Image (tube, rainbow, N blue to C red):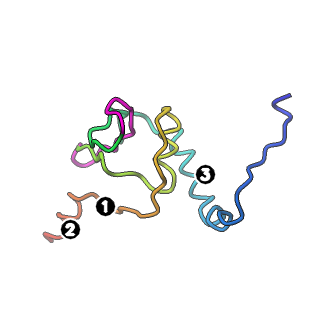
Amino acid sequence: MILGRERRIELPANLRPLAKLHIDTLIENCKQAFFLEMNTGYVIDVDHTGKLQTSLEPVVTIIDQNTGADLASSQWTGGLHQFLQLKHGCRLSAMSLKAVFMSNVSYLKVGQI
């Protein structure tokens, strides 16, 4: 019986501290990805960066809320991007551990003040 089976995830010992550190963020981002709607903040499109083997492969592309510009080379952090990729059946990209806290346009506006 599938519903009665034990549900457990085995992590390698070297990844356990990282998982414990980020588990709350991952859970919240998983829930957020479930409720995010396509064409509101992101689109599913083909690769326009030339980084993938095939240009016909669908990818999650972030749309800047302020400008409407495609941010094809950007990813959300905390697993949000990967959860959206899972949601839409896209190939999973590696999870980035660096964060971008503001768009380039916002950064330039701050510099002008």
Q: Secondary structure at mark 2?
A: helix
| Residue name at image x 49 percent, y 49 percent | 80
Of labels 1 and 2, earlier in sequence is: 1
Number of other residues with Cα within 10 Å of mark 2, as a class: few under 14, some 14 to 19, many 20 or more: few
| Residue name at image x 34 percent, y 44 percent | 62
Q: Where the C terminus falls, by quadrant?
A: bottom left
x%, y% of residue 72?
A: 30, 45
Instruction: Answer with left or right where residue 16 lies relative to residue 47.
Output: right
Q: Where the N terminus falls, by quadrant?
A: top right
Of labels 3 and 1, earlier in sequence is: 3
Q: Quadrant of residue 46?
A: top left
Instruction: Establish if 70 lies above or below 18.
Output: above
**Residue 66 painted magenta:** yes
User: Which one is nearer the viewer's eye here, 44 or 48?
Assistant: 48
Q: Are marks 1 and 2 in contact (CB under 8 Å)?
A: yes
Marks 3 and 2, Cα distance to the nearest angstrom? Answer: 32 Å
Q: Amino acid at mark 2?
A: Val
Q: Identify the residue under disc 3.
A: 27
User: Which one is nearer the viewer's eye here, 53 or 63?
Assistant: 53
Of labels 3 and 2, earlier in sequence is: 3
x%, y% of residue 81?
A: 45, 47
Marks 1 and 2, Cα distance to the nearest angstrom? Answer: 10 Å
- Say the numbered circle drawn on residue 102: 1
Q: Are marks 3 and 2 in contact (CB under 8 Å)?
A: no
Instruction: Establish if 30 lies above or below 44.
Output: below
- Say the numbered circle drawn on residue 21: none
Q: Which residues are magenta?
A: 53-68
| Residue name at image x 31 percent, y 61 percent | 102
Instruction: Answer with left or right where residue 111 lies relative to residue 32.
Output: left
